[in-house]
Image (cartoon, rainbow, N blue to C red):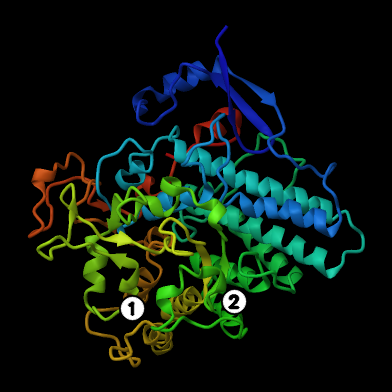
């Protein structure tokens, strides 16, 4: 009899798999996955165990009880959560989200070869067994399950007061937000193929674990319905660390932009912009926007961390920043992004890129790669490892509106929105004034501004692929297969390496569904 190991999966189940089979993507070649699956399928069983502490049966339906349960859902975005019997420094929703999105983009360069599974975002050498996608899938559905639990409890209350309506709306928002991040990472963009397999929608506690993937179109429809319901229910604000009507509108603008319902993207952007509740940071206040995210005038919704949540080298900041002792500091702003920003050295957005100099004044290097630390996740309360990551902020709504207008042929109006951003980023002397520079389309101008403004916030790779643009990474970094430090010549661009360009149509623009889901859910189909 083989010893067994409980592996958490979606819903309320654990997968019991055989110990002795190493599920690490570093040790399993894709050529033997079929053999691995057949062996596991022959020797595993499902053990029904509750994976969440709350159920509709034991949930206290007072406002305080519901609020406590909902706060548990919010905490899952930042807490280290046990997975596969282990609490790891990597096991945090936001840490994995940024690794899976931004590390796969052209904004961040990899400064070394590593056995950490985030390396597969740089190389696109994905596998169904990689630990970070397995955890992200698990924790996402745990958030969704918690939201569903509170939704079902609140909807049993026949006469709900305003506070309970607000909490119910927040649950619908969190469910929509979690589903949206999943569909962006594990399914093709809506603009590529709305009928492609999406993700598994979990909308009720009564569903069985075996459920097929909904189409991308169906997933988007569900997200939009949840976010619309959320906006209707929420009529008070509990602070930027909680969902609000404006946060739901911001999500609706983003989702409609992704599906190219441009009129709707503009409509919801207008609602947020015209609410009067938020103002853009100025050149004077922008440098404190991210360290003081919870109180910043631009923040619509953020995940609030406190000093208790200082995870040190397990923090979001640790891979992209170090003050010399605080973090690993092994991934940097890419040369491609720096080249774009260098057109305007006075841009205040350089505040969040730090290039330590050597004694000669040259930028320091690590393994031959120029060190350009990223500071968007540092210096809350002066702590280099602490921040409250912003999920939605006002600048994005101007950019959503600009992109939608550009696609509707409203070029002058789109450039007006870009100029509003640029004026507040120290670029008042280089505004567009409704005139496109030669060689740029309106969409080019918008995507360039989005890239600079929203850099390192989990947008870039999706902005490329949903607009059917290739990922171009013709710069030195360890995403290049077989690169040695002695090969690096910063006076020229690399050539002859694989993995410098990834087509928006390539299957590795998205991740495999985790092996846990495939083994436990016979109706779930794998990505090619």
Residue at 9% from the left image edge and 46% from the top image edge: 487
The number of discs equals: 2
Compared with 108, 422 (above or below) is below
Q: Quadrant of residue 175?
A: bottom right
Residue 470 appears in the rendering: no
Q: Secondary structure at mark 1?
A: helix
Q: Quadrant of the C terminus?
A: top left
Residue 348 — which label? Answer: 1
406 or 226: nearer the eye? 226
Q: Is residue 524 visible?
A: yes
Q: Which residue is mark 2?
A: 268
Taking 128 as reference, is 181 left or right?
right
Write down the quadrant of residue 36 in the picture: top left
| 454 sits to left or right of 337 | right
x%, y% of residue 223? 63, 59
Viewed as shown, does residue 484 lie left or right of 471? left
Residue 240 vs 345, above or below: the answer is above
Q: Quadrant of the N terminus?
A: top right
- Numbered disc 2: secondary structure: helix
Left or right, 76 with reference to 389: right
Distance Cα–Cα, label 2 vs label 1: 28 Å
Residue most extreme to the top: 1
Pointer 2 and pointer 1: residues touching (CB < 8 Å)?
A: no
């Amino acid at each position: 009899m083989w010893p067994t190991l409980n592996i958490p999966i979606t819903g309320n189940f654990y997968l019991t798999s055989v110990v002795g089979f190493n599920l690490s993507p570093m040790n399993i070649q894709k050529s033997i996955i079929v053999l691995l699956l057949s062996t596991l399928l022959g020797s595993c069983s499902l053990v029904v165990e509750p994976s969440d502490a709350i159920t509709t049966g034991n949930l206290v339906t007072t406002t305080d009880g519901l609020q406590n349960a909902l706060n548990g859902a919010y905490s899952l975005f930042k807490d280290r959560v046990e997975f596969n019997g282990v609490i790891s420094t990597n096991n945090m929703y936001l840490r994995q989200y940024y690794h899976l999105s931004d590390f796969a983009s052209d904004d961040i360069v990899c400064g070394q070869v590593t056995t950490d599974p985030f390396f597969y975002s740089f190389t696109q050498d994905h596998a169904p067994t990689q630990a970070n996608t397995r955890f992200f899938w698990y924790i996402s559905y745990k958030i969704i399950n918690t939201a569903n639990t509170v939704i079902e409890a609140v909807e049993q209350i026949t006469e709900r007061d305003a506070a309970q309506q607000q909490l119910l709306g927040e649950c619908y928002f969190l469910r929509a937000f979690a589903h949206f991040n999943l569909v962006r990472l594990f399914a093709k963009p809506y603009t590529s193929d709305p009928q492609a397999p999406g993700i598994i929608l979990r909308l009720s506690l009564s569903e069985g674990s075996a459920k097929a993937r909904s189409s991308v179109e169906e997933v988007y429809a569900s997200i939009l319905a949840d976010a619309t319901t959320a906006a209707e229910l929420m009529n008070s604000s509990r602070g930027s660390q909680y969902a609000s009507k404006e946060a739901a509108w911001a999500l609706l603008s983003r989702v409609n932009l992704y599906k190219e319902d441009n009129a709707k993207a503009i409509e919801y952007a207008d609602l947020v912009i015209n609410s009067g509740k938020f103002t853009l940071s100025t050149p004077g206040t922008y440098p404190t926007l991210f360290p003081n995210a919870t109180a910043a005038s631009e923040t619509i919704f953020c995940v609030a961390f406190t000093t208790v949540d200082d995870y040190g080298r397990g923090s979001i900041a640790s891979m992209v920043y170090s003050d010399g002792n605080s973090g690993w500091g092994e991934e940097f702003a890419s040369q491609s992004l720096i080249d774009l920003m260098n057109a305007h050295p006075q841009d205040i957005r350089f505040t969040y890129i730090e290039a330590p100099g050597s004694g000669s004044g040259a930028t320091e290097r690590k393994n031959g790669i120029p060190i350009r630390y990223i500071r968007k996740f540092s210096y809350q309360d002066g702590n280099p490892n602490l921040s409250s990551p912003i999920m939605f902020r006002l600048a994005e709504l101007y950019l959503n509106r600009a992109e939608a207008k550009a696609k509707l042929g409203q070029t002058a109006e789109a450039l007006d929105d870009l100029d509003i951003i640029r004026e507040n980023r120290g670029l008042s002397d280089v505004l567009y004034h409704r005139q496109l520079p030669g060689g740029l389309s309106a969409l080019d101008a918008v995507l360039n501004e989005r890239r600079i403004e929203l850099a390192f916030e989990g947008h870039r790779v999706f902005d490329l692929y949903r607009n059917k643009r290739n990922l171009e990474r013709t710069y030195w970094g360890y995403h290049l297969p077989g690169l040695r430090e002695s090969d690096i010549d910063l006076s020229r661009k690399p050539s002859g390496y694989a993995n410098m360009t990834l087509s928006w149509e390539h299957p590795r623009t998205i991740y495999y569904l985790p092996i846990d889901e495939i083994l436990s859910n016979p109706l779930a189909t794998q990505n090619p």
